Image (cartoon, rainbow, N blue to C red):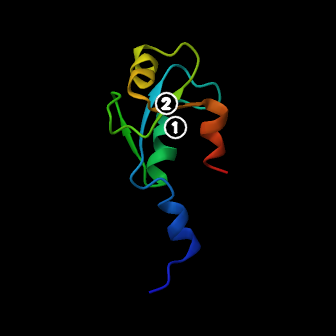
Amino acid sequence: MVSLPEEKTLEKLKGKIFVLTGTLESLSRDEAKMKIKALGGEVASAVSKNTSYVVAGENPGSKLVDAEKLGVKVLKEKSFLEIFK
């Protein structure tokens, strides 16, 4: 069976786990979560070794420190939004 391009787009983030920290300028946390889930990604509330990315907005909390300790890739809001283009 051949996959349609739309199906691939819907699974663009499949298997990726995101953690959000700080305040995002251009969208609410709920909107960010919906965007991630719409592309097949997951959103977690805490950073772990299984976290794929931490999205850091303004005034990030301890989750940013945890990400740095664990070597998890940190995305600023601009880079995060590029995923959805």
The relative height of residue 62 versus residue 30 in the rendered view (above or below) is: above
Where, by quadrant of the figure, is residue 70 drawn? top left
Total numbered circles: 2
Tags 2 and 1 touching, CB below 8 Å = yes
* Residue drawn at 33 percent across, 39 percent down: 50
Give coordinates of residue 34: x percent, y percent: 47, 44
The relative height of residue 66 versus residue 17 in the rendered view (above or below) is: above
* Residue drawn at 54 percent across, 12 percent down: 59
* Residue drawn at 50 percent across, 16 percent down: 60
Density class for disc 2 (Cα within 10 Å; few <14, some 14-19, many ≥20) is some
Of all residues, the one furthest to the bottom in this rendering is: 1
For residue 29, which numbered disc appears in the image? 2
Q: From the image, tell me which residue sits under label 1.
A: 32
* Residue drawn at 55 percent across, 63 percent down: 9
Mark pair 2, 1: CA separation: 5 Å
Density class for disc 1 (Cα within 10 Å; few <14, some 14-19, many ≥20) is some
Q: What kind of residue is marked 2?
A: Arg
Q: Is residue 15 left or right of residue 81?
A: left
For residue 53, which numbered disc appears in the image? none
Give coordinates of residue 5: x percent, y percent: 58, 72
Say what secondary structure mark 1 lies in: helix
The relative height of residue 48 versus residue 35 in the rendered view (above or below) is: above
Give coordinates of residue 48: x percent, y percent: 32, 31
Q: What kind of residue is marked 1?
A: Ala
Quarter of the figure that contains the N terminus: bottom left
The relative height of residue 78 versus residue 10 in the rendered view (above or below) is: above
Give coordinates of residue 25: x percent, y percent: 64, 24
Q: Nearer the viewer, residue 38 or 58?
A: 58
Say what secondary structure mark 2 lies in: helix
